[in-house]
Amino acid sequence: MNGAGGAGGAAAGKLPMVSHRQVQWRLADERCELREEEMEYIRQFHRHEPSSNQCTSFVAKHIKAPLQTVWSLVRRFDQPQLFKPFVRKCVMRENIIATGCVREVNVQSGLPATRSTERLELLDDNEHILKVKFIGGDHMLKNYSSILTIHSEVIDGQLGTLVVESFVVDIPEGNTKDDICYFIENILRCNLMTLADVSEERLANP
């Protein structure tokens, strides 16, 4: 995903702590408790089959903005920097957003990599599902695949959105399952917090 001291120095060691000045405080504070009916989304849409050397987990976020506002940001496979604070630049290999298209992502310093090559596995505008697979780059997240879904809900009497993102990935040598899950979960929480901020700002200032 992205790099502080470059991929070479980090690849031989353990994953670093995520450190992004503007959102670091949110990592420990952000929690999202799901009701039983919301857990059904996990069972229905977020089915991964990890092998013995892989791990899987998910994060979730309630956003005080309508589904269509949130989805308009999430579906922009060509502009992940809209809500991913660690992304510095994204270049598409193709001129369209469709299943199988590939993006080249450059990332901010702070994580053990500088670039990532990512393929769009599914973009479903009806069910609001985004699936992405990492197919290259200088990061440690080998065979990383994610599923992001969004679901309409009511928050404080207003239209809102529940966002759920899950992943499966190889466990890097020298790290534990807890190491890699904690590392990725924190990055995803940063992304979802930014997604909430941007979505709610767009709603307030259309």
Image (cartoon, helix red, strand yellow):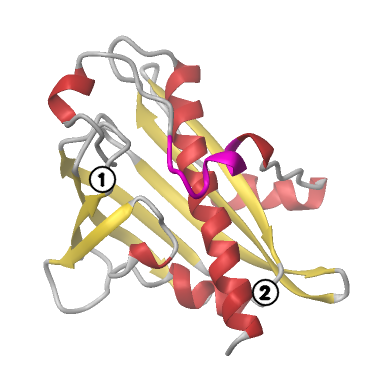
In the image: residue 49, left or right of residue 115: right
Of all residues, the one furthest to the front in this rendering is: 21
Q: Amino acid at mark 2?
A: Ala
> 10 Å neighbourhood of mark 2: few (<14), some, or many (≥20)?
many
**Residue 19 higher or lower than 75, as above or below:** above
Q: Secondary structure at mark 1?
A: strand
Tag 1–tag 2 contact (CB < 8 Å): no
Q: As rendered, which of 45 and 137 lies closer to the eye?
A: 137
Q: As rendered, which of 4 and 184 lies closer to the eye?
A: 4
Residue 206 occupies quadrant: bottom right
Residue 180 percent across, percent down from the top left: 42, 24
* Residue at 65% from the left image edge and 53% from the top image edge: 61
Residue 97 occupies quadrant: bottom left
> 10 Å neighbourhood of mark 1: few (<14), some, or many (≥20)?
many
Residue 62 percent across, percent down from the top left: 70, 58
Q: Quadrant of the N terminus?
A: top left
Q: Is residue 148 magenta?
A: no
**Residue 6 higher or lower than 98, as above or below:** above
Tag of residue 69: none
Q: Earlier in the sequence, mark 1 or mark 2?
A: 2
Q: Which residues are magenta?
A: 19-27
Query: Of the residues tagged 1 and 2, which is closer to the observer?
Result: 2
User: Is residue 125 shown to the viewer in this render?
Assistant: no
Residue 88 percent across, percent down from the top left: 26, 57
Tag of residue 65: 2
Q: Secondary structure at mark 2?
A: loop
- Residue receiving disc 1: 134
